[in-house]
Amino acid sequence: MTATKLNETMWVGDWQDAHRFKLAKPDGRVITVAHDSPLIGHHMYPIRDGPFQENDKLFWEAIDKVVSYKGTGIPIIVQCTAGISRSSAVVIGAAMRTRGISADSALEQLRKLRPQANPNPYFMALLHWSERRLITPPSVTHAYDRILREVPGQA
């Protein structure tokens, strides 16, 4: 496979794509979202491809890291071992947060560029579960959560 260019500064792919990316873009950053990738990235999130509770915190941290590069001009590649499930899920989460779109819409748009994108059902369930938090501006989410805490029997 070949890394898929998503925009001017972001790619998604497998570990071999990330290796080529490092050689071609020495100023770029590799975000590794796999516990079993032979490539060591600049940012490591050892996520296992499946419904493992220890994945949850790492998954959200990886999405936060991808989002943190938006607007910096620094090229990044998000990579997992095969470039199909974990990297796709993290890219979808970042798109949800930065573009305010649903998980299904982000997946559909990603598959137009990278047809092999296929996040496992667990990651898609996490993304669906979190849609309100990822696509709502943080200040609105915080205010909404505060209101729910003040209403008896809510939240």
Image (cartoon, rainbow, N blue to C red):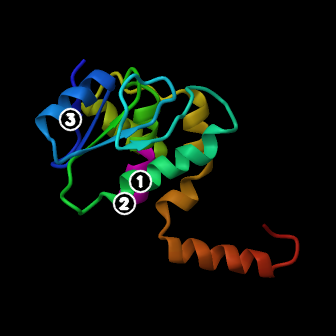
Query: What's the amino acid at mark 2?
Result: Ser
Residue furthest to the top: 1
Task: Check residue 61 for magenta coloring.
Answer: no
- Given residues 90 and 132, the one toward you in this image is 90
Q: Measuring from the top left, give residue 59's x and y in whole percent.
A: 54, 44
Image point (39%, 22%), residue name = 38
Q: Earlier in the sequence, mark 3 or mark 1?
A: 3
Rendered position, 149 above or below 88: below
Image point (15%, 48%), residue name = 8
The quadrant the C terminus occupies is: bottom right
Label 2 SS: helix
Rendered position, 71 above or below 90: below
Q: CA distance from mark 2 to mark 3?
A: 19 Å
Q: Dot 3: few (<14), some (14–19), or many (≥20) neighbours within 10 Å? A: some
Task: Check residue 93 for magenta coloring.
Answer: yes
Q: Measuring from the top left, give residue 56's x and y in whole percent.
A: 62, 43
Q: CA distance from mark 2 to mark 1?
A: 5 Å
Image quadrant in which you'd find residue 152: bottom right
The quadrant the N terminus occupies is: top left
Q: Dot 2: few (<14), some (14–19), or many (≥20) neighbours within 10 Å? A: few
Label 3 SS: helix
Q: CA distance from mark 3 to mark 1?
A: 18 Å
Q: Measuring from the top left, give residue 154's x and y in whole percent.
A: 81, 70
The dot on residue 65 is: 1
Image point (37%, 56%), residue name = 67
Marks 2/1 in contact by CB < 8 Å: the verdict is yes
Q: Which residue is mark 3?
A: 22
Label 1 SS: helix
Q: Which residue is mark 2?
A: 68
Give the residues drawn in magenta, as a range. 92-100
* Dominant secondary-structure state across the stretch colored magenta: helix
